[in-house]
Amino acid sequence: ATSGAPAASAAPAAPVKGGSLTFAADTEPVSFDVHQSSQDITGAIMRNVFDSLISLDASGRFHPWLAESWEAAPDLKSYTFKLRKDVVFHDGTPFDAEAVKINFDRIHDPATKSQLASSLLGPYTGTKVVDSHTVTVEFSAPFAPFLQAASTAYLGFYSPKTIAANSAALTSGGPVEVGTGPFVFSQYAKGRQAVFTRNDAYKWAPKTAAHTGPAYLDNLTVRFLPEASVRVGSLSSRQIDVAAAVPPAQTKRIQGNAALTVLSADYPGGNYSIYLNTSKEPLNDEKVRKAIQRGIDIDTDIKALYFGQFKRAWSPLAPTTPGYNASLENSWPYDPALANKLLDEAGWTTKDAEGYRTKNGKRLVIDWPLLPAQYVRDQRDILGQAFQADLKKIGVEVTRPQADIGTYLERVYGGKADMADYSWARAEPDVLWLLLNGTSRPQKGGQNATFLNDPDLTKWTDEGRATLDEAVRKDVYGRTQQRAIDLAIVIPIYTQSQVLGLSKQVQGLSLDANAWPLFYDAWLGKPS
Amino acid sequence: MRRSTIIAGLALAPLLAAATVPDLLTSVSPITIDPVRALLPPGAGHWFGTDQLGRDLFTRVVYGARPSLLLGLGATVLAVAAGALIGVVAALGGRAADQTTMRLLDVLLSLPQLLLALLVITVLGGGLVNVVVAIALAFTPGYARMVRTEALVVRRSGYVEAAHGLGLRPVVLVVRHVLPNAVGPVLVLATVGFGTALIAGSGLSFLGFGVKPPDPEWGSMLAEGRDFLADAWWIGLFPGAAITVTVIAVNVVGRAAQRRYTRRTS
Amino acid sequence: MTTALKRAGAGFAVLWGAATLAFAALMLLPGDPVATLLGPATMASAEVRDRIRAEYGFDRPVLVQYFDYLGKLVTGDLGSSYQLQRPVWTLITDQLGPTAQLAAAAVVLAVVIAIISAVVTAGRSHTVRAAAGAWELVAVSLPSYWLGILLLTAFSFQLQIFPVIGAQDLVALVLPALTLALPIAGLLAQVLREGLETALAQPFAVTARARGLSQLAVRLRHALRHAAASLATLTGWLVGTLLGGAVLVETVFGRAGIGALTLQAVGNKDMPVVMGVVLLSAVVFVVISNALDLLHAVIDPRVRPA
Amino acid sequence: MIDVDGLTVSFGGPPAVRDVSFQVAPGECLAIVGESGSGKSVTARALVGLAGDRATVSSRGLTFDGQDLSRLSEAGWRGVRGRRIGLILQDALVSLDPLRTVGAEVTETLRTHDVVPARERNRRMLELLAEAGIPDPEHRAGQHPHELSGGLRQRALIASVVAAGPSLLVADEPTTALDATVQVQILDLLGRLKEAGSALLLISHDLAVVSRLADRVAVMYAGRIVEEGPAADLLADPAHPYTRALMAAVPAAHAKGTLLSVLHAGPSGACAYASRCALADDTCREEDPPHADVAPGRRARCHRPFERLPELPPVGLGGDRKAGPVLLSADGLVKRFKDRTAVDDVSFELRAGETLGLVGESGSGKTTVARIALGLLDPDEGTVMLGERRWSGVREKERRPGRRRIQAVYQDPLGSFDPRHSVERIVGEAVAITGSPRNRRRARVIELLDQVGLATGLLERRPLEMSGGQRQRVAIARALATGPDVLVCDEPVSALDVSIQAQILDLLATLQRDLAVAMLFISHDLGVIHHVSDRIAVMKDGRIIESGPVAEVFGSPKEPYTKELLAAVPALTSERSPR
Ligand SMILES: Nc1ncnc2c1ncn2[C@@H]1O[C@H](COP(=O)(O)OP(=O)(O)OP(=O)(O)O)[C@@H](O)[C@H]1O
Ligand SMILES: Nc1ncnc2c1ncn2[C@@H]1O[C@H](COP(=O)(O)OP(=O)(O)OP(=O)(O)O)[C@@H](O)[C@H]1O
Ligand SMILES: [Mg+2]
Ligand SMILES: [Mg+2]
């Protein structure tokens, strides 16, 4: 997998203006309100409509965008942004300091029911309008991850007019989504497609973009095609130009087609990992956790299922995330013998008729709930079956009850399940705070499904978010990753990868730091 | 007996064997993975090929018979039992009881069976048992109405009147004449209903509400194979074929039973 | 007049029953609806959760909620989706189009296939009837989700005759409609053929032939109308089940529509949407069954009120 | 006109029609008679090429007006059917398409054969209906068959059949399902058509109907014509024993106390009738008789034509019985259903050993009276007494012990049996009521079966596996099982063939003689009623309008309605008429 490289590296022809591009997404946003939604897809699609204060490049550096410049207070408790003066919303409203305040306040307002954006704002206390084009965003505690947060579409800006008129309706997409971005959200048909048209007034592209001025494409259509086979099939028959989330099994097929190509990038942030619930039997025993960590043949399973398309993960953090600890690689390979030994030591010595280990007459059972089918991505349910088979070999039974999402959340975040699996994409090591900090308790909306409040982990992740010093961050995050593996509270599985299938006719398409396609620079060449 | 009935009966035999003693038909375990041999096409070693984890599809289809048949059978038995009870009570329990149950049934019958099942799933959640309950509930109103209609016909029939004229007590009358004759034809119809229940149950499984992995079930196997349609058609072919063949065989046998029954009783 | 009133009354009774059933399901729902409302991977705080609880009135007594719900129903307010936070009414009306299109295409296809098959094969030689019986049997035994997969594999992936997407154009409708139609066509053909054969064996059919009418004329002019009565009843029932079938077919073909909406709602315990779909089905049922009663009276003078 | 030579039709098995030959001339009526299943209808249908897809039809010659029909193509047949040969189907009441108006059916014939120009079709259709004797044809033409009475339907059907003016009319049982009064009118209508020059092929199982219209008669038995000749001669002096049996089996011709049936079973032989023939000898069993001339103009297929059957033995009840005590009495019964009064002020008495015949047209309330008498229905007014016991308006609990004293035999024995039960269980259930110990039940069932003339081999049979006659015998056995004083027989023989009918009537008579049960016997068939009853009551619209000893009511009816009923009875034009 390559990262962020523009597609179609052949002879760079001059970009062509015009044309319509159809992009097939695998999921459909439940809510289009970027301030409210927690879905990746919402950010990915709405990126075309919303600009951010600053932009983040693939190497983790920040560049001006709607803010010409910015400055962090030394205590990292406030950030001041100087805004561009020539920016206007799609509805003609000028973009100014007041707009920033209105938007951030809206995110912070509980009535918005924000599920992600408000956490990106962290300990937000308010926005001060310094002058018409200068704002200061203030926090109650040092908050280093804010810059990265400010570069995401979730902290994008709605026209104050539309917030005033349509605040409740912003969830449902369509022309009410008034932003400053290169495309205007012109039409939405649920279950089918969202249509975007070029914003001809656009002239505030970030430095990270390949060109300035309006986008090349007249129209961008996003089709919602949840079936992978349907996405790939329609790409092959050229009914769409770009397909998201091409399953690894099908990439070969696309590569074999002369008119098509594959563009991929690893997602930054939290790898797809299994989190072990340390608050209850039997995983409160570190030996058992370790046994499970080492008793899964992750390499083989990943290779079989993903054909090498997804990289096997060694750390809870993805390699493309700043602060990634590469020394973990190959440090805890598959070792069934060790796993068996650890289980013996933990007292799970006897075996029952079906070959499962028992202790005091109780079978070693791990309860690992399965998400409802429509939330299952990348065939993780099948991968889970492979893990079940692996663990059976060392005498561990894994049960996978499947229920609705409410029940699932209750089990997993209520601490009733033994294991939970998820990934958390974000181009910022602060995800480790979310995933492992002792105060990031699921009961309170956190994401730490290990239910462990390890003083070290908590301390380090707190320190990481309170500094912008690269060296300090590298150190604390590196140690955090190491300790999480040592404690065997997390079993990293693979690094998720955005795999786009696209027609070679599509030029200039790139993937941003979050591994999402950017359509601003894209254009359509001659049909091949 | 017709030739088609015999063939159908013969087709059912291995299915029943698969459902009861799967280990006789295959020596491999349905959940043992072998990632190295993933996605092998059908061939000598693997008659139906292998799936994405290298599991032998033949074995999985064989082992999938039990939950799949159980879905159809459990749901049908439950539905017929509940339907018979409701139907007989409605038909013999007096006007008020009849009116109430009929209005209730009207409501349930106004909804597509799959939707009714999905409503139950929404409340109960997925899983084999819940799917059986959901399908049973969805099919119960139909059976209840059939039994009621039959019971009303039987109640007004000459032989019930004749038995009444003999001076039989009402309890004897119901147990000896009304019940068997009202439920009998419905039972025969239920063999065909079994096929429908199997399709519906596997359908729910296909939608992801059924059997929990990694246990094989035909509907969920189909769902798992969907991403591989373009490259590994066999994953999507055999489980579906198993459902279809089962339903065809059951339908043929059921219709033969129906013919026999009609020949004997009307 | 009174029959019309009675009919309307019965229709409303069914609708009210369906509404109550849906509400009962809502109340029986275990777990916290707020969790459902928020969906997976949520970071909402307890404060937000309480706010939502109060907003939806989950904290009120059941009866109050019930009458409030009925009251809103009467005014056409189906509530808002937990998950999508949009009015159920808009969601359903938005999704009705593609499903109605699919269902209509399937019904037409099924009826046409069934009529052709039945008229051509009814009362013919043993071999012809056995062949007809065989195809009908296979058709009714086919799970639509498998049939869809087969058709997709064959015609879209291998032969690339039909596109796999494109809900808008007619071509893309062919495979899904066929998938939905084929099992129904099998059943209809069966019933129609039996109806035709029964009718053809009736003295009036022989009388018609004794009058000098040709085989085909007797089939079309006399027998078909008799078979049509049972066909109409069955078709009506099938239209109802199409909604169920749409759930599967829309999933297989990745199409938008009521089926996909329902499935999404069921998976998320998004009760307002599920309830809305239940009501929709009940309405469709009431409308169709009344229409069919009228149609039946047109076809068969014996059931006309004197 | 039509000349049929050696017609044979088979449906895969043994031929249903074998080597049948006959001719019909214009203005002539040939009647084919025979019992059910003898092949009459198949013959009729074969004449228009509609014997069915599964039928194999062959003949030495089948010519109509000199045209060879046996070589016709399907299109050719279409020109013959309706246009030159009209067929009135056996099932008259369902031979019109129930979904179309009767006018449309008549018009269809006119259009198919383009009889009159399109714009005159309607006028001609109305004319035809009028000619067929339908009053107010404008109104009737727009009605559907279910809105018409049986008689009107039959007329409309005839109108549609004769619309294209066929020169041969084939009428298959044109009067069977109709009320007696209507029967006469339809026969008159056919008679007029014959006089107008049509050739008429009349098919019936009823010799009485035939005698009214036929010039010549052919008797069919087992697919063959066994006797034929001029109607008058043949009916006066039948040559074939089967014809004789057919005539003798008409109950109307016998007074109570004589046996109707001939119960002889013999080994099957070459003469198809040998096994049923009282006269059969070795020749009959070894050699198939040829169809030979037996008298001028008459042929029969018999080795011993014209030989007399032995006289039927009298049952011995005669008319000289003393009336016993009153077993069942009804006083002022009234029963109303929603919109009509089904039974209106009905009173009667029934004494031990006697039979009260209840006669009346369909819907007159006979069955309702029977159900009240049986205690299955409570009257709205009036009382029923069973012996000394009050029988109506009491609780079922009080009634239950008395139930065994009054039992019923229904018109439809099949429907009165639990279809899953064997004969042993059916009769056994009734035996069990009497409190007979379990181990003796089987013996008692066998005894009862023997009493009604059934073999032990039937014990395991289910209702569907028996013939109509056998079923009715089982029903009688069940009724007798409780040792009743009163038998209520509601149309017990209406669904049966004449010959079987005769056997059952004989059985009932014998049983009454032996057991001295009282019978309430219901029938719409005056012949049957006349044969079995001591006294009769005539019902009309729920009321008994006339009652008295059978000879009195039949001999000098007082009510106009009774007279009309009696006049409508098709009787053999021979000295055997009851009058
Ligand atoms: N379509 C058919 N297929 C097979 N057998 C038939 C068919 N039609 C008639 N038969 C048989 O042919 C024989 C003669 O039947 P047909 O209808 O001519 O009797 P029928 O004399 O008209 O009797 P009925 O008085 O009851 O009308 C019967 O044994 C009958 O079962
Ligand atoms: N259970 C009932 N409910 C309503 N009406 C009834 C019922 N039983 C009989 N009737 C009506 O009462 C009248 C007399 O019916 P009944 O059966 O006694 O006539 P019947 O003389 O036996 O006629 P048939 O000769 O046709 O048997 C009919 O008009 C019938 O429709
Ligand atoms: Mg006949
Ligand atoms: Mg009657």
Image (spheres, grey):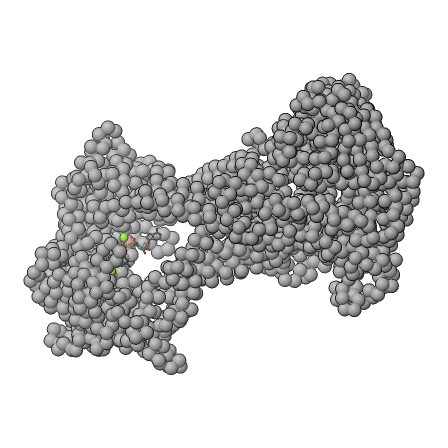
Image: B6 above or below C184: below
Residue at image x 43%, y 55%? B102
Image: B14 above or below A235: below
Quarter that holds the C terminus of chain B = bottom left
Q: Is there any visible trace of residue D577 in the rendered image?
A: yes
Residue A290 placement: quadrant = bottom right
Q: Quadrant of ligand 1?
A: bottom left
Residue at image x 14%, y 76%? D323
Compared across the picture, whether C62 is left or right of A106 comes to: left
Numbered label tally: 0
Residue at image x 28%, y 45%? C306
Residue D502 x %, y %: 22, 66
**Between residues B261 and D578, which one lies in front from this camera angle?**
B261
Residue at image x 27%, y 63%? D411
Compared across the picture, whether D433 is left or right of C180 comes to: left
Q: Is there any visible trace of residue A294 in the rendered image?
A: no
Residue D99 x %, y %: 31, 42
Residue D317 placement: quadrant = bottom left
**Between residues A193 and D162, which one lies in front from this camera angle?**
A193
Image: C47 above or below A258: below
Residue A371 x %, y %: 69, 49
Compared across the picture, whether A62 is left or right of A403 comes to: right
